């Protein structure tokens, strides 16, 4: 939920704007936010666990596709060589 908030940037300048806050947070409560060098609020950085999960989600299908391509290539090569060998034996 977006709420109006006031915070001090790294140089001590007071800033105001919309920030994301959990539901039910009491008015006037302190909330940790992430700010850019300009002092503007930014989303929380990705955790190492989230980055690892995303890497698994992305690389999993790529590895499966690579295995399928290699298997199809092996089958095609095997059939081609078998046909060549059988023709040579005749």
Image (cartoon, rainbow, N blue to C red):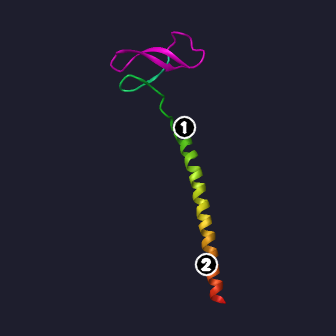
State the SS at label 1.
helix
| Residue highlighted by disc 2 | 81
Label count reads 2
Give the residue drawn at x 59%, y 67%.
73
- Comparing labels 2 and 1, the label whose residue is closer to the camera: 2
State the image coordinates of residue 27 (x, y, percent, origin top left).
Answer: 54, 10
Q: Is residue 51 above or below residue 67?
A: above
Residue lying at the far bottom in this picture: please name it: 90
State the image coordinates of residue 87 (x, y, percent, origin top left).
Answer: 64, 86
Quarter of the image containing the C terminus?
bottom right
State the residue in front, 9 or 81: 81
State the residue in front, 84 or 61: 84
State the SS at label 2.
helix
Q: Is residue 38 above or below residue 67?
A: above
State left or right for residue 69 relative to residue 19. Answer: right
**For residue 12, which numbered disc appears in the image?**
none
Give the residue drawn at x 55%, y 42%.
54
Q: Which residues are magenta?
A: 1-30
Q: Is residue 8 above or below residue 61?
A: above
Q: Which picture quadrant has residue 35? A: top left
Is 25 one of the magenta-colored residues? Answer: yes
State the image coordinates of residue 13 (x, y, percent, origin top left).
Answer: 34, 15
| Residue highlighted by disc 1 | 50
Q: Is residue 47 above or below residue 35?
A: below
State the image coordinates of residue 18 (x, y, percent, origin top left).
Answer: 47, 18
Is 16 one of the magenta-colored residues? Answer: yes
Sequence order check: which comes first, mark 2 or mark 1? 1
Marks 2/1: CA distance? 46 Å
């Amino acid at each position: 939920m977006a709420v109006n908030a006031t915070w001090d940037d790294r140089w001590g300048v007071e800033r105001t704007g919309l920030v994301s806050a959990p539901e039910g947070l009491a008015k006037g409560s302190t909330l940790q936010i992430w700010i850019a060098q300009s002092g503007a609020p930014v989303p929380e950085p990705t955790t190492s666990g989230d980055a690892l999960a995303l890497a698994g989600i992305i690389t999993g299908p790529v590895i499966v596709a690579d295995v399928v391509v290699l298997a199809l290539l092996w089958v095609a090569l095997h059939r081609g060589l078998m046909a060549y060998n059988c023709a040579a034996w005749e």
